[in-house]
Amino acid sequence: METRVSNSLSVAQSHKKAPPWLWPLLWGALLMISVVTMSAAEPLFRWIEPEARQVIYDRAGFVTLLGRHLFVVGIAALVTIIVGVAAGIAVTRSWGSDFLPLVAQLASLGQTFPPVAVLALAVPVLGFGTLPIIVALMLYGLLPIVRNTLAGLQGVEGDLKAAAHAMGMKPGQILRQVELPLAAPVILAGIRTSVTINIATAALGATVGASNLGDPIISGIVNGNMAYVVQGALTIALLALTIDSLFEVLQRQLRARSSDA
Amino acid sequence: MIELSHVSKRFGDETAVDDISLRVAKGKFCALVGTSGCGKSTTLRMINRLIEHSEGDIILDGQAIDAYDPVKLRRRIGYVIQHTGLFPHWNVARNIGLVPRLLKWSATDVQSRVAELMHLLGLPVDEFGHKYPHQLSGGQAQRVGVARALAADPDILLMDEPFGALDPITREKLQDELAKLQARLHKTVVFVTHDMDEALKLADHLVVMREGQIVQQGSPLALLQSPADPFVESLLGGLERGLKQAALTRVKDHMTSMGPTLPSQSRIPGTFSLRQALSMMLRDHSDRLTVVDQHDVPVGELSLRRIIKEAQLDNGNPRE
């Protein structure tokens, strides 16, 4: 891990412009270092909480917590991307346009509903554990994806679609070869917003018994141990930065593909 | 050959095209002219079934267009629109190769066809093949648009105000290129424009439309000589009509054999138009010009008196 960091740093020095993968590698390395060596930082956390009996959260390893966190966010993201993009495509087709206002409204309703309230409603139905938090994340993450898919597809000039039609392209070919590639940067921006928000929101899962990086935070709040809170928050922040910078790279490559000669 | 007989198009209660009949022979250039909203673009789009006609028959090469599969029909008809409709995420070569790829040509065939067309339209492959539409000037982009329409070598070319968004100089240049291209390729062209000069310059057959109906159709000269009504006359330029007619007539056709040449007399190539000859006479304060061939050798003489006399004769018996 350390060698990867030093590699990307030396690359950064030899070129004037930072290589695209620098930031995700850097944040990712920091994240891995912090989850693997959290216990080594005991003196630092002891300084935050000199009175506490224990300053390093140890009910589960940070690597395990990170893995569970990623699993929850990943499953929710996968489902929201499939459902959100499919819904966005469906309601911008001529046969689905009747449902456009409905879908747009449902998606924004999902976002106005606080995730805590979703959890409170989901637990009686789905029980404690991982499932309610996945449902809450799906509802919460759907809007940015649906909204951006709609904006991206509606932003494709009518002239272009008409030209594609007139050249003898079939509807499926127009969607795959013209509309989706042109809307891709906007759709990807929506996915980025959705996933980044959900990395933070997933921490709430700890309140309904889904073990993830929210555990140290909730436990820290309950027991009045600030060191736990910092450990959870720091790891979540590094995870969010890693994923967000990954999306930044993807977006930049997408943009470069259509604008470079 | 394209034949429309008693074709109408209604959108709800509105009649966009009202019982029109017209025939474009194979290899001929037909221009649909009229003010905006006269139904000329609708007429064009009915030919490749972007809009389905409500009544009448549209026959393509002896077969009603309803019998064709719309997608296959469009792939064998070239189509050029005003704002080019080039795909911004594809480079020039990929844009031009679209229809051949849809027709599942092999990659090498597509590549060589693209190169051939780019050469034909004066866009060097090395320089332009990898450029994206936003890196092209308006004129270059429209050349790519024309190349894309010609890619699968269609017999029929539909053009919807293709040069309408270009500056006057570029527009004129592309009109000249299109005329040359047409002289070589002999496509059956239907060309929509509101610019009468453009139509007069390019068309073999001129169709004037108003409020969904055809007001008059015929050769450009026939329309100039006897416009059917004041509307057609005003479209044709009112008082300028004489000059527009002169622009369509070549000096060669009105010259007489050489008289005694005055040394100071100006020279004009026989391929120039009478309009250019008249302009030259006004400029040089002269009523006679020496007509020369392409090697600048005098072959005849043009006199103002004779041009005017023959114009009267032409008006008396319109030539087709």
Image (spheres, rainbow, N blue to C red):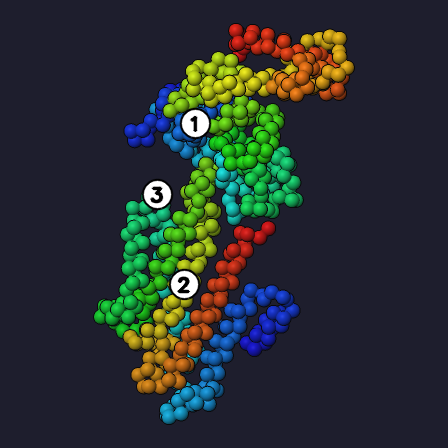
A240, above or below B46, in the image: below
Q: Residues within 10 Å of mark 1 (few under 14, many from 20)?
A: some
Please provide percent x and percent y for residue B249. Answer: 60, 16
> What's the amino acid at mark 2?
Thr
Q: Nearer the viewer, residue B234 or A105?
A: B234
The image quarter in which residue B15 lies: top left
Does A196 sit left or right of B101 as displayed?
Answer: left
Q: Identify the residue position indicated by label 1 in the image.
A: B35
B121, above or below B275, in the image: below
Same chain, marks 3 and 1?
Answer: no
Instruction: For the residues labelled 1 and 2, say whether their Cβ atoms are less than 8 Å apart.
Output: no
Distance CA(mark 2)–CA(mark 3): 28 Å
The image quarter in which residue A72 lies: bottom left
Please provide percent x and percent y for residue A73. Answer: 38, 68
Please provide percent x and percent y for residue B250. Answer: 63, 17
Identified at 58% across, 30% down, the residue is: B172
B311, above or below B240, in the image: above
Looking at the rendered image, the disc whose residue lies closer to the viewer, 3 or 1, is 1
Q: Secondary structure at mark 2?
A: helix
Which of marks 3 and 2 precedes in the sequence?
3
Q: Identify the residue position indicated by label 2 in the image.
A: A193
Question: Which chain letter goes with mark 2?
Answer: A
Looking at the rendered image, the disc whose residue lies closer to the viewer, 1 or 2, is 1
Q: Residue furthest front?
A: B285
Does A62 sit left or right of B26 as displayed?
Answer: left
Distance CA(mark 3)–CA(mark 1): 31 Å
